[in-house]
């Protein structure tokens, strides 16, 4: 079991900055995110978009802001569980919590800070018969560890950048790679598209264009996909894995079931300290709501600071908080 | 004012009267008419959560931009008549068009 002072659910910009604010007050943080990387909406939806409203940074690319935040919090040595979704939170008799993820990782903490943004980014699923029945049995929506696919037969579906990138990468790892795409052109990064066409010409991958996967079959484990061409003929292809890559879409997910006061998919908080209706649980960033709420990174940063000061009382119930500016103390790492 | 018809995911049809001289896009019109459209990115063709299919009037609409096509490429249910509502500027060419909402709806929790 992982033990920490604050478990932060969501490693978007606001969750990351909360580590800094908590660290200044000597509280340790563990972050959990359903995505395999940190950065939330910034890394997932708009990594290359410039942002203009971060104080002191007249123009900064979203991913650069995330990278800077990672650098800024490094002295406080936060720990991470990535690629796992928080499913349940249980209150213990001593008022601490146990947080459990989709992969059964357990985190024991004194405070929970929900920085879940718009919710979990979940894979967009194509309408393929039987798809969900084979999840975890050959169907996967994320390449967490490419080694899993070594010397296996893989079918990928999709036409965006991640479908192109993983096709290229896995062509060196898997026994066979087939990419199925609805169209006959790719509008992802032009050189990735070019590489994919070259790999197909060289016979290193199978490229099945103007086609859709319509059905999958198997016996306890996936073993074939049925691919329909534009002329409606269906071909069957044997495979070990199917990886549909159609991007991610945010869903509130399990947060709705934790007994928190929810108003229109957001958690109601007290603006005094961004506490929720459950003592010891805070909500900051896009996931919370209060009169006048603005869904801006800046506002989430402000909320992090106030949250940390209140959380201090839960982590150190017998200590008095003597607040000093960071310029007085410096950033005292752990 | 122009008229358009919108079908929600359940197939229920509503005719909307919309101003064509305010520089609005279809996503904003849908939101203003209380359709549950997420529109996470606020209209930048970056999230795909305002996906619609054009059932009638496709030929009168402005062509897709590259950004819109890129996004549509990542939607598993996109068809040849798919558009992102945020990229469709409301003007008189849209009069009489029929749209069907495709994007997953926002989760409403009481
Ligand atoms: C296209 C676009 C442009 C934008 N431009 C700007 C701008 O210029 N300036 C600005 O200030 N804001 C901008 N925003 C808004 C800004 O991105 C958000 O305000 C910000 O990302 C909120 O940060 P967050 O950390 O609260 O949430 P998010 O960035 O949404 O991160 C939340 C994280 O929580 C994770 N999560 C949720 N639930 C769970 C769970 N149960 N278990 C595990 N993980 C979970 C998610 O996977 C996600 O990674 C823009 C947004 C978009 C989409």
Image (cartoon, rainbow, N blue to C red):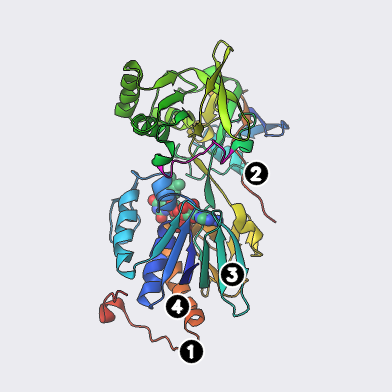
Does mark 4 have its CB less than 8 Å from ligand 1? Answer: no
- For residue A276, which numbered disc appears in the image? 3
In this view, the residue in front, A24 or B58, is A24
A268 sits to left or right of A50 = right
For mark 2, give the secondary structure: loop
Residue A299 is drawn in which quadrant? bottom left
- For residue A309, which numbered disc appears in the image? 4
- For residue B34, which numbered disc appears in the image? 2
Task: Rate crowding at label 2 as few (under 14), some (14 to 19) or many (20 or more) other CA atoms within 10 Å.
Answer: few
Q: Nearer the viewer, mark 3 or mark 1?
A: 1
Image spot of residue A190 (x, y percent): 31, 27
Dominant SS type (magenta) = loop
**Of the image marks 4 and 1, the number of the one nearer the N terminus:** 4
Asked if the residue under mark 4 is in contact with the one under mark 3, i.e. CB atoms within 8 Å, the reply is: no
Asked if the residue under mark 1 is in contact with the one under mark 4, i.e. CB atoms within 8 Å, the reply is: no
Query: Does residue A132 lie above or below A85 as drawn?
Result: above
Name the residue tied to disc 1: A318
Asked if the residue under mark 1 is in contact with the one under mark 3, i.e. CB atoms within 8 Å, the reply is: no
Spatial CA span between label 3 and label 1: 22 Å
């Amino acid at each position: 079991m992982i033990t920490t002072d604050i478990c932060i659910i969501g490693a978007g910009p606001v969750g990351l900055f909360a580590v800094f604010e908590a660290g200044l007050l000597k509280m340790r943080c563990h972050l959990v995110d359903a995505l395999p990387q940190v950065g939330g909406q910034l890394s997932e939806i708009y990594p290359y978009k410039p942002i203009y409203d971060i104080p002191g940074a007249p123009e900064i690319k979203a991913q650069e802001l995330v990278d800077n935040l990672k650098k800024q919090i490094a002295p406080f040595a936060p720990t991470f569980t990535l690629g796992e979704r928080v499913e349940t939170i249980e209150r213990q008799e001593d008022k601490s919590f146990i947080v459990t993820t989709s992969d059964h990782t357990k985190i024991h903490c004194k405070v929970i800070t929900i920085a879940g943004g718009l919710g979990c980014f979940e894979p967009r699923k194509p309408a393929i018969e039987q798809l969900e029945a084979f999840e975890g049995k050959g169907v996967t929506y994320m390449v967490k560890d490419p080694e899993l696919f070594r010397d296996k037969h893989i079918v990928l579906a999709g036409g965006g950048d991640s479908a192109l990138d993983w096709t290229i990468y896995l062509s060196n790892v898997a026994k066979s790679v087939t990419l199925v795409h609805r169209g006959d052109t790719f509008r992802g990064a032009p050189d990735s598209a070019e590489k994919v066409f070259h790999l197909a010409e060289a016979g290193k991958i199978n490229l099945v264009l103007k086609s859709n996967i319509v059905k999958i079959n198997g016996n306890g484990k996936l073993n074939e996909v049925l691919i329909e061409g534009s002329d409606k003929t269906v071909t069957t292809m044997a495979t070990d894995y199917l990886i549909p890559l159609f991007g991610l879409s945010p869903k509130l997910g399990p947060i709705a079931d934790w007994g928190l006061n929810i108003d229109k998919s957001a958690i109601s908080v007290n603006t005094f300290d961004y506490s929720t209706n459950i003592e010891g649980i805070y909500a900051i960033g896009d996931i919370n709501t209060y009169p006048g709420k603005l869904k801006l990174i800046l506002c989430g940063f402000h909320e992090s600071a106030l949250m940390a000061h209140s959380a201090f009382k839960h982590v150190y119930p017998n200590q008095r908080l003597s607040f000093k500016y960071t310029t007085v103390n410096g950033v005292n790492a752990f | 004012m122009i008229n358009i018809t919108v079908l929600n995911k359940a197939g229920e049809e509503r005719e909307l009267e919309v101003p064509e001289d305010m520089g609005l896009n279809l996503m904003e019109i849908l939101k203003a008419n209380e359709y549950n459209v997420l529109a996470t990115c606020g209209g930048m063709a970056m999230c795909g959560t305002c996906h619609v299919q054009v059932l009638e009037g496709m030929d009168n609409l402005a062509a897709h931009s590259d950004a819109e096509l890129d996004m549509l490429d990542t939607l598993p249910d996109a068809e040849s008549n798919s558009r992102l509502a945020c990229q469709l500027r409301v003007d008189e060419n849209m009069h009489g068009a029929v749209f069907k909402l495709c994007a997953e709806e926002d989760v409403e929790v009481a």
